Image (tube, rainbow, N blue to C red):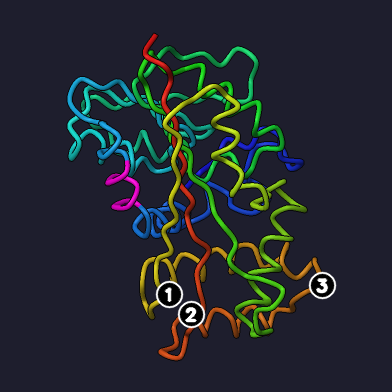
Amino acid sequence: MSGDGGDAPAGRYGEAVFRPEQAGEDDRIDLGALAYDDFTLARLRALGAGPGWRCLDVGAGTGTVARLLLERAGVAEVLAVDRDTRFLRAHPLPGLTALDADITAPGFAPGRFQLVHARFVLMHLRDRERMIGTLASLLAPGGVLVIGDAVDLTTPAAPTTAYHRAMRAMWEGLRDTLGTDVSRVPDYPRQLQEAGLTSVGAEIHVPPLLPGSPISRFWAGTWDRARGSMTATGLVDDATVDAAIRYLDSPDCAALSPGLLTAWGVRSPR
């Protein structure tokens, strides 16, 4: 779950909080992927991804979606793009090409594809509407653009538990340090339509927070790495973050994880 946040105030996305060279960062990314990959693959296959398709995976992270497209959907080729492809290059696979690139760069134009996919990427970019248009322009006629980002289910009416306080502090801290903003994610279907795409649809998946589950371990690792930006908001202190991490591994955990909203649209075949 690595993004191309070229507009983030910290420069290269994530390096102010989630350093690629930090021990275990690839494992943390993979834990998040495990929580969502089956859901993502099912949607991509339902939209037609299969033999003969040339695919672009933007912000590919460790490459789990790219590999599933090749190994389980049987697509012909996946171009996996990220600003840091060390995790992609560590596990080569026939049909998988890793490209170090910034999708926000004016000259980003790697070709035309039957599928363009970006998960947990656009929420890190300020000019996401322009980027949706850019990604749509990379579709071959009849191709499909699929974008997915987090939906925050922590509301002002939610109880003020350590978990909810930590989640709110995380989003505020990531906005301050990286430029992350999930507030407009529910508007993706409209933005896809305005990009000229048709047959637009959307759905949400919320994995359960179970003790020891991949998503619970992902948030625990994320909060541990992001605790500096979280405590800087003044919403939590270290003790609250520690309590929230313990809560994730408790059988009494009864909170909702942020969901993954996936939206898609099709380029006219003409």
Badge 1, how many Cα within 10 Å: few under 14, some, many 20+?
many
From the viewer's side, name the closer residue of 241 and 265.
Answer: 265
Check disc 2 and give the amino acid type.
Leu
Check disc 3 and give the amino acid type.
Gly
Residue placed under numbered mark 2 in the picture: 248
Label 2, label 1: how many angstroms apart (C-alpha)?
Answer: 7 Å
Label 3, label 2: how many angstroms apart (C-alpha)?
Answer: 22 Å
From the viewer's side, name the closer residue of 267 and 149.
Answer: 267
Main SS of the magenta part reads helix
Badge 2, how many Cα within 10 Å: few under 14, some, many 20+?
many
- Which residue is pictured at 34% across the width and 21% down the height? 114
Mark 2 in CB contact with mark 1 (< 8 angstroms): yes
Residue 187, x across and y down, in percent: 61, 44
Label 1, label 3: how many angstroms apart (C-alpha)?
Answer: 26 Å
* Mark toward the start of the polypeptide (1 vs 3): 1
The numbered dot on residue 209 is 1
In the displayed structure, does residue 69 sit left or right of residue 119? left
In the displayed structure, does residue 157 sit left or right of residue 153? right
Q: Residue furthest bottom?
A: 252
- Which residue is pictured at 43% across the width and 12% down the height? 111
Compared with 96, 227 (above or below) is below
* Mark toward the start of the polypeptide (3 vs 2): 3
Quadrant of res 230: bottom right
Residue placed under numbered mark 3 in the picture: 234
Quadrant of the drawing holding the C terminus: top left
**What range of the chain is rendered magenta?**
37-43
Residue 99, x across and y down, in percent: 44, 24
